[in-house]
Image (cartoon, rainbow, N blue to C red):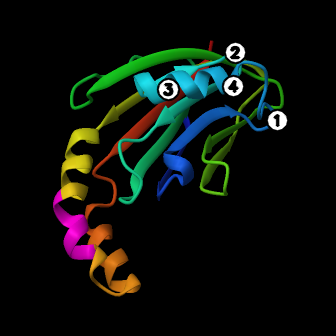
Amino acid sequence: MSCLDTASLVFIPNYQFFSVRDYDMYERPGATEALIAAHKTIVAAGDCEVFVVCAQDLLKVGLTVSLYDAPVGVDPTGWDSTRRFTLPFPTGVLHAGDGFGNVINLELPHTGSYAVILQYSGRDEAAATLLREWPVAAALPLDQTREVLDRWAGLERYQITVFPA
């Protein structure tokens, strides 16, 4: 197995969530129910999209997507949870991010079904850090607020591993 591509993004997901799907599979049947479920369980999927609700919405989260050409095992060390899903990719373009342009788009080697393994860590630390730092940061001018909060960018992080199913 070979890693075909890896991309990373550090961003504030609008509306406190992001998803993984084929570029063309936006708002398919089951998406609303999966998003509602993710608000209760952190991660949930419909038939076409995986939703992830972040622990907070002011510190930037880290997201990395790695694409492999064959099944690969993932190491759970250092991650709070590992979840596996299978999604269709009819256009062969993976879209991971929010609905407002904070995205990673990767060209898949072919269309079809892919395994999507999601791992996350740092959620509790990010929420605790925000509780501690927000009163100080909120009293500053906006540009200084962002500087203070950006010190913890990527504390909450997500890894997505993708390969043909």
Q: Which mark is residue 38?
A: 3
Of labels 4 and 2, earlier in sequence is 4
Of labels 3 and 2, earlier in sequence is 3
Residue 153 quadrant: bottom left
What's the residue at 79%, 25% (across, down)?
28
Percent x, y for residue 119?
A: 38, 29
* Residue range of the region highlighted in magenta in the rendering: 132-137
Circle 4 residues within 10 Å: few <14, some 14–19, many ≥20: many
- Name the amino acid, label 1: Asp
Cα–Cα gap, marks 1 and 2: 13 Å
Give the SS element for disc 2. Answer: loop
Up-down: is 156 above or below 120? below
Q: Which mark is residue 24?
A: 1
Q: Is residue 117 visible?
A: no
Of labels 1 and 4, earlier in sequence is 1
Whether residue 113 sits left or right of residue 162 in the image: it is right
Q: Nearer the viewer, mark 4 or mark 2?
A: 4
- Quickly name the residue at label 4: 31
What's the residue at 40%, 16% (across, down)?
73
Q: Which mark is residue 60?
A: none
Q: Is residue 134 magenta?
A: yes
